[in-house]
Image (spheres, rainbow, N blue to C red):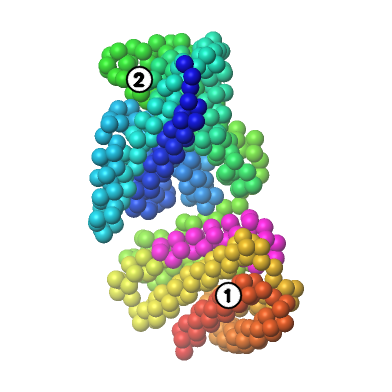
Amino acid sequence: MELNWQEMMFQFIGGLGIFLFSIKYMGDGLQKAAGDRLRDILDRFTTNPFMGVLVGIAVTVLIQSSSGTTVITVGLVSAGFMTLKQAIGVIMGANIGTTVTAFIIGFDVGEYALPVMAIGAFLIFFFKKSQIQNLGEVIFGFGGLFLGMELMSGGMKPLSELPAFIDLTVNMREHSILGVIVGTVFTLIVQSSSATVGILQGLYSEGVLNLDASLPVLFGDNIGTTITAVFASIGASIAARRAAATHVLFNVVGTIIFMMILEPFTMYVEWLSGVLDIGEKMQIAFAHGTFNVANTIIQFPFIGAWAYLVTKLIPGEEVTIEYKPKHLDPHFIETAPSIAIGQAKEEILRMGRFSVQGLQESFEYLKTHNKKHAETGYQLEDAINNLDNKITDYLVKISAESISKADSTRHIMLMETVRDIERVGDHFDNIIELIDYQEVNRLKLTDDAIKDLTEMFTLTIGTVEKALEALDTNSLGLAREVAEQEDLIDKMERKFRKKHILRLNEGICSPQAGMVFVDIVSNLERIGDHAVNIAEAVLGKRA
């Protein structure tokens, strides 16, 4: 029989594209429907590794991506929200959560794919309420999974009659390690274990592969999905590299264990399919689920050992930015509100130090264009936003208590100050984005422009530091110095704008690069405004 390779490839690639799009679209819809609070869920409920496993399952089911869950987890470890042991629990849970897609595909309802997608599209385009549109995205993506599977299966079916493919499947049955390699490589290419497991379900259901050859490929899929995390961790933080290494080791060890018991495991899957009377696609889904659940149960007691091992394999001190507040003790709110106000002030000063550090990181990014400074800056801005919410909530609770007139004045000052520090975070975040824009568009700032920005950055950082020192020490003199320095920043901004116009007129500077320069100067000037606001709050308190 002569195969129409073009038709096969187009049908398979088109089906794979629809499948991958549908997974992402369904995951995005689920995530939006659940609310964008995944980090809070991970932070709040991963109190121990066992809870981490449960949360890892739940979050991965929501976003339909074990890699996505791992990325969020790595961010929380870097931020000091979560220990490496807790993170390992979440990664184990993510592996179980990712099997849900295989079970969804196991329900062979491909003939209803198009009507389901039509319902989803109707909800997306004919309703304005975001919750209904989110549900529409989930339903549309759900239908797309089956449409993609139908197309892929149809494209792969003729392979069962191709001599070269028959030889490959025979070799995979005789040399099961070859199946592991095939599964690993294919998942690495496609960058989605859900997609490769779906393809495997299609091959098995069409009789192209038998169970003996399918299971090693399934194990390889689980190894292949970890490679994505490895690539993502290259050049990243130590915490990211350790989490990625744990993910790899966890799945490689699991594969070794199951390859050693491949024959009894194959018999178990056959027995289970007979008892439950399930189809071929569901057999693969149960095999996938059993592998990940059993692997987690086997390795769960060794989480401490894994954490110790990856710390030794990847040595070094991880620089963490602790998002969590350190001073906001809720017990003081009712018993000693005056002390609680002092606690809030300490946390605000800590938040202020983050703002100074963020400014310094954005300045270093401007000078070196090293992405590590941008990433740290973004983390600091995120930490500032988190502390802003926590401190504001704490101060609101204090306001409900009976406090003295002096404490009330301090309370108002702190409420105003926390808002100004949060705005400083927004502005250095803007600056980092402007430098990103400069990098992407390969815009070059002139030496004069860099010199001007260096002068203004130095003065602005010093002004914010002085404003925080004035807040810390209640110094009237320092607060006045801040006001004087802010006046210098304003004059500097006007002077540098004029110099920029001259450079433009002379053709020394491009309009796009000039836009970056002007916007950075503008953001620095506004940071000076917020610094003087902090100083004026101190002056108002002392008056």
Which image quarter: residue 329?
A: bottom left
- Residue 50 shows in the view: no
- Mark 2: secondary structure: helix
Label 2 sits on residue: 280
Inter-mark Cα distance, 1 to 2: 60 Å
Query: Disc 2 marks which amino acid?
Result: Glu
Secondary structure mostly seen in the magenta stretch: helix
Residue 449: mark in rendering: none
Label 1 sits on residue: 519
Q: Marks 1 and 2: which is nearer the front?
A: 2
**Is residue 135 magenta-colored?**
no
Estimate the x, y position of residue 159 in percent, counting from the top left. Answer: 47, 20
Q: Which residues are magenta?
A: 362-390
Question: In the image, what residue occupies the spot 47% across and 82% down?
Answer: 537
Between 157 and 230, the one lying in front of the other is 157
Between 1 and 435, the one lying in front of the other is 1
Mark 2: give few (<14), some (14-19) or many (20+) Cα within 10 Å.
many
The total number of labels drawn is: 2
- Residue 138 shows in the view: yes
**Is residue 374 magenta-colored?**
yes
Estimate the x, y position of residue 57 in percent, counting from the top left. Answer: 38, 37
Query: Disc 1 marks which amino acid?
Result: Asp
Which image quarter: residue 337?
A: bottom left
**Along the horizontal axis of the image, is 523 left or right of 501?**
left
Question: In the image, what residue occupies the spot 39% across and 78% down?
Answer: 412
Residue furthest out toward the bottom: 543
Is 61 rendered above or below residue 535? above
